[in-house]
Image (cartoon, rainbow, N blue to C red):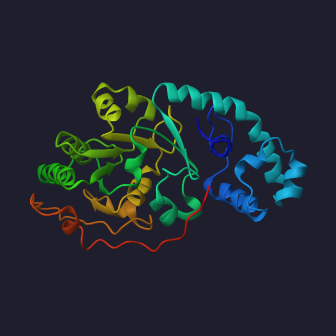
């Protein structure tokens, strides 16, 4: 069961257990709340429970409008807690910035814009492991598909995991090749986490810890447009195919390797780290506790 602090984050920063009209706190507003808590004797999010708006203003220095919003949203704490418990029965977990398994690279690269809450299934430890992002649009040339398969196999051989946005084509090819070779993968599904978990082709890999599915959207909702940025910033190295680099500008992730549009080849014997030796790493922005 998630901690009290985690349940507060889920309640304030997602619409879990509530209607579509609920406006949750975005990542930067949540960061403002956390900083206010930490300035007040380093209080944790659990300290917000049961507080009226006036007390939130007085104790933590929140604005009047934000205090009222926090008080209103926390009335849904019970509903959110029950939904977290229901999701756990079908193998779906919640992960917040305050959890030990939360990706360090997101905190470092995205700073206050790091998603406060994500939902997923599978081995959470894989999110902090050695990951290579492969990003490419649907379809892809025969040479790009061959490149994607070889990359997946190389990652499996060297103990790395492939992370993708779950799109058909080169991303699907690379994930399948990595799993078939005994490796692991992380996928941000395009449809939803709930559908990804229910998909027969995924079940065994999720249960045995080889596949982790993840989304910043609610478990029943389609993956958001920001999932490409989340994939890119989660990985230590990145490769972009089929015109994808334009979408990665300013994302905060590693500089992607961009194979040419012609006959793309990858040396199957080359170590993964050698393949991406030219990839730069962005400066760290610092970590946020919750």
State whether residue 8 is above or below residue 1.
Answer: below
Identify the image quadrant of the C terminus.
bottom right
Q: Is residue 76 left or right of residue 117?
A: right
At 23% from the left and 45% from the top, the residue drawn is 183
State whether residue 214 is above or below residue 104.
Answer: above
Q: Number of marks in the image? A: 0
Q: Position of residue 289 (x, y in %)?
A: 61, 59
Q: Position of residue 217 (x, y in %)?
A: 52, 41
Q: Is residue 200 left or right of residue 189?
A: left
Identify the image quadrant of the N terminus.
top right
Give 177 or 104, whichever is nearer the viewer: 104
Q: Position of residue 12 (x, y in %)?
A: 68, 44
Q: Position of residue 178 (x, y in %)?
A: 21, 45
At 15% from the left and 54% from the top, the residue drawn is 147
Asked if residue 19 shows in the view, the reply is no
At 47% from the left and 25% from the top, the residue drawn is 90
At 14% from the left and 52% from the top, the residue drawn is 150
Q: Is residue 160 left or right of residue 42?
A: left
Asked if residue 213 shows in the view, the reply is yes
Give 5 or 254, whichever is nearer the viewer: 5
Within the image, what quadrant is residue 280 found in? bottom left
Q: Is residue 48 left or right of residue 223?
A: right
Give 253 or 7, whichever is nearer the viewer: 7
State whether residue 34 is above or below residue 216.
Answer: below
Give 210 or 145, whichever is nearer the viewer: 210
């Amino acid at each position: 069961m998630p901690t009290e602090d985690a349940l507060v984050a889920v309640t304030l920063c997602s619409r879990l257990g509530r209607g579509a009209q609920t406006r949750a706190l975005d990542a930067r507003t949540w960061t403002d709340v956390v900083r206010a808590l930490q300035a007040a004797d380093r209080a944790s999010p659990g300290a917000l429970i049961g507080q009226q708006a006036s007390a939130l203003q007085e104790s933590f220095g929140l604005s009047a409008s934000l205090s009222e919003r926090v008080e209103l949203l926390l009335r849904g704490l019970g509903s959110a807690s029950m939904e977290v418990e229901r999701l756990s029965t079908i193998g779906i977990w919640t992960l917040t910035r305050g959890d030990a398994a939360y990706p360090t690279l997101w905190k470092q690269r995205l700073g206050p814009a790091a998603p406060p809450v994500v939902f997923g299934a599978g081995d959470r430890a894989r999110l902090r492991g050695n990951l290579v992002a492969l990003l490419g649009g649907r379809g892809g040339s025969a040479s790009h598909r061959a490149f994607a398969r070889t990359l997946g196999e190389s990652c499996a051989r060297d103990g790395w995991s492939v992370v993708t946005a779950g799109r058909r084509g080169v991303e699907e090819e690379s994930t399948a090749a990595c799993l078939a070779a005994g490796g692991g993968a992380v996928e941000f599904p395009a449809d939803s986490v709930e559908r990804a978990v229910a998909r027969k082709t995924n079940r065994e890999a999720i249960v045995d810890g080889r596949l982790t599915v993840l989304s910043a959207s609610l478990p029943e909702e389609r993956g958001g447009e920001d999932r490409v940025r989340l994939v890119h910033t989660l990985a230590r190295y990145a490769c972009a195919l089929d015109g994808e680099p334009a979408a990665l500008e300013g994302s905060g992730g590693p500089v992607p390797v961009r194979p040419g549009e012609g006959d793309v080849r990858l040396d199957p014997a080359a170590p993964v780290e050698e393949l991406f030796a030219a990839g730069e790493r962005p400066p760290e922005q610092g970590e946020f506790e919750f």
